[in-house]
Amino acid sequence: MVTARKLEGTRSLTTLYVIGAACVLLLAGLITATAIREEYVHRIDTAQQATSTLARAFDEHIYRTFRALDQQSRYVADYFVRYPDIAELTARLQELLHVDDVAVQYAIIDARGRLYATSTGTSSIGIDLSDREHYRYYLQPDADSTYISKALLGRASHKWSIQYTRRIVDDSGAFRGVAVVSFDPLYLSRFYKSLTSGDDIVVSLFGEDGQLRATSQVDRFAAMVERNYRHGPLFTHYAAAAEGDYENIDATTGEAAFVSYRRIKDFPLIVEVSLPRATAFDGLRSSIMTYSGLFLALLLMIVLAGWLLRRYAHERLLAERRDREAWAAAREQQFMRSIIDTAGAIVFVADGEGRLVMANALFEQTFGPEVDGTWLNAVTRRPFDAVCQQLPMHSETQVADTRGRLRSIAWTLTGVHDSAGTLRHLVGIGLDLTEQHEAELAIYQSGKLVTLGEMATGLAHELNQPLNAMRLTLDNVAARHAAGALDEEYLLRKLDKLERNVTRASRIIDHMRIYGRRSDKHIAPIEPAEALRGALTIIGSQLSEAGIELRIDTALETMHLLGDLLLLEQVLINLLLNARDAINARRRREGADVAALITVAPLRDGAAGVCVCDSGGGVPADIGDRIFEPFFTTKPVGQGTGLGLALSYGIIRDLDGVLAYYNSGQGACFTIQLPPAVAPVVRELSDPQ
């Protein structure tokens, strides 16, 4: 009951807190919104006031500038009447040019539209300017006495200029020509830009004809002067009022701006000042962020206080839950370690980044308790990324344990992925096959010794031949010496024969010692032709004495396989001896006329391997499934152990190959298929004498 009352009190306190926090947040939100709106309105008013003030200031400057130009045009018109001599008129115009710093040229166009005089000299006098706008304007019957042209490239001055012109008439009122005052529009542009330097304010001067006369955007002047703005927003507002303010959106850039404009008194000109909305509101965002930050800070404080209140109520429950989960996780980990420690296999678990998470005792005994970041490369001989791309993976590698002993381990690696397919854990289980491989190698070694024992008679005969030849040679030399007929040439021939027979016997003994030594199954690129030559060194004479023809395909000389040279030689010896025995057995059954032939050639269809075929009649169908079983033999008692083909089958299997057979027309063909090699063959050195 007490607990229920405490719970109810906690709920009431929480409800009151939520209501109070909501009221505080509502009031703070209203204050923040009001402050932001007042800041927004203030910036609009400030921007419009700034553009309007600048428009009035530039209006006054432009008015004074064009009043000066108007006065100069009067001087030029008066000079035309006062100085009829061209040279003197030119000099006067040049003097006038030095006085004023706005104009760039003074000129007079006669009534025909020809350049009559100019301040630039007399070289351009006579140029036809009848097509110029500021001349053709005065051909209209209702033309005013002055005219301001748009910016154009002067034919005499070769500079951009605006022409302030005045009509020249004689005393009778007849048209005599045009007085021209050319001034640089960029003078006004640069002046505007200097006053607004560092700001985004744009000052532009337009004529009532819609043509731009000057702008503070100096770099855009050449492009803007070609356009007509008669149908733009400025002239829409100008048609309603001679001065005013409005907000404009640029059709090209999409940028909004506050604009103020004024008509220049006494001149057909309009000055426009625009301030980008983004510039006017520069800093407004920071103000909004400040107000919003204060509001969010208050919100966070309220949320934090509420969170602390809830945390206080649930802290004990969460602590108890964490304790229960930690206890369960520890029990689960202890249970899993008990399982993997008694599994009899090497077990490890790594995370998705390749870091070792868990390993059993056998793993630590094999590779040590502390393994660095390259542990997977040391364990499997492959980097972590390569392993992850081939999961699930089965492989066998030779690695060194903590004592430096090489161990053969068969690995099974699997991945544990989440619902998105991301690798979370890598699980590896390894079986130590070292003792098994050592036992197999011992069996293979025993098989070689058994083979040598079975070939003892043949090997004795193989060695007896060179020994008999040497004894006969020595007898002949002794007989010649006793007869006194031993000359140097004869003695040298006999010594050479003795050396050849000694070399032959030595080669047989050396190869028997190499063949009889222990093999550690070193897989490397080998030449099957080399293994065949080694086998024939031992049993070649036995095949010859049995009257068996041996045919060897020369294509074997260019074949490279992956395997162990001595183990392949052992298999070839077993197959050749079995082929010999099969041919002899067929002779006993069918007579001596049976063909005696053994062929050794590459596998058919371009496969990598060797095929040994005989003419011994083939393998009977009823025993074909048993010929590779240990101790199975069809030979008479005392002529075989039944281990030759079984050991050969195991050797080829351990070399990642396949030993099989099929019956051909005359006998059996045994095929040895091994992986092809692309690396160069490294030949092994024979044992020293």
Image (cartoon, rainbow, N blue to C red):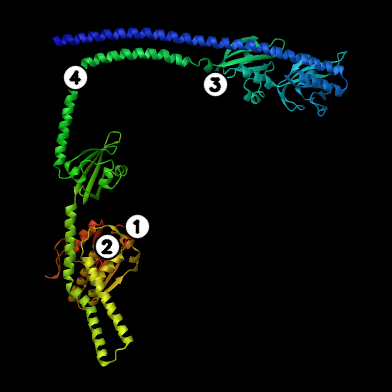
Q: Is 593 displayed left or right of 156 in the figure?
A: left
Which is nearer the N-term, disc 1 or disc 3?
Answer: 3
Which is nearer the N-term, disc 2 or disc 4?
Answer: 4
In this orientation, does residue 627 appear? no
Local packing at callout 4 (Cα closer than 10 Å; few below 14, some 14-19, many 20+) is: few
Which is nearer the N-term, disc 1 or disc 2?
Answer: 2
- Circle 2/circle 4 CB separation < 8 Å: no
User: Where residue 416 appears, x then y in whole percent?
Assistant: 25, 38
Query: Residue under circle 4?
Result: 317
| Mark 1 residue type | Ala
- Circle 1/circle 2 CB separation < 8 Å: no
In this orientation, does residue 477 appear? yes
Question: Disc 2 on helix, strand or loop?
Answer: helix
Q: For marks 1 and 3, give the CA distance.
A: 68 Å
| Mark 4 residue type | Leu
Q: For marks 4 and 3, give the CA distance.
A: 59 Å
Local packing at callout 1 (Cα closer than 10 Å; few below 14, some 14-19, many 20+) is: few
Q: Disc number at residue 254?
A: 3
User: Where residue 652 appears, x then y in whole percent?
Assistant: 24, 59
Query: Residue under circle 2?
Result: 565
Q: Is 526 displayed left or right of 451 in the figure?
A: right
Local packing at callout 3 (Cα closer than 10 Å; few below 14, some 14-19, many 20+) is: few
Question: Disc 1 on helix, strand or loop?
Answer: loop
- Circle 1/circle 3 CB separation < 8 Å: no
Query: Residue under circle 1?
Result: 679
User: Where residue 212 appears, x then y in whole percent?
Assistant: 67, 20
Task: Name above or below for residue 382 compared with residue 602.
Answer: above
Question: Disc 3 on helix, strand or loop?
Answer: loop
Q: For marks 2 and 3, give the CA distance.
A: 82 Å
Q: Is 661 displayed left or right of 162 in the figure?
A: left
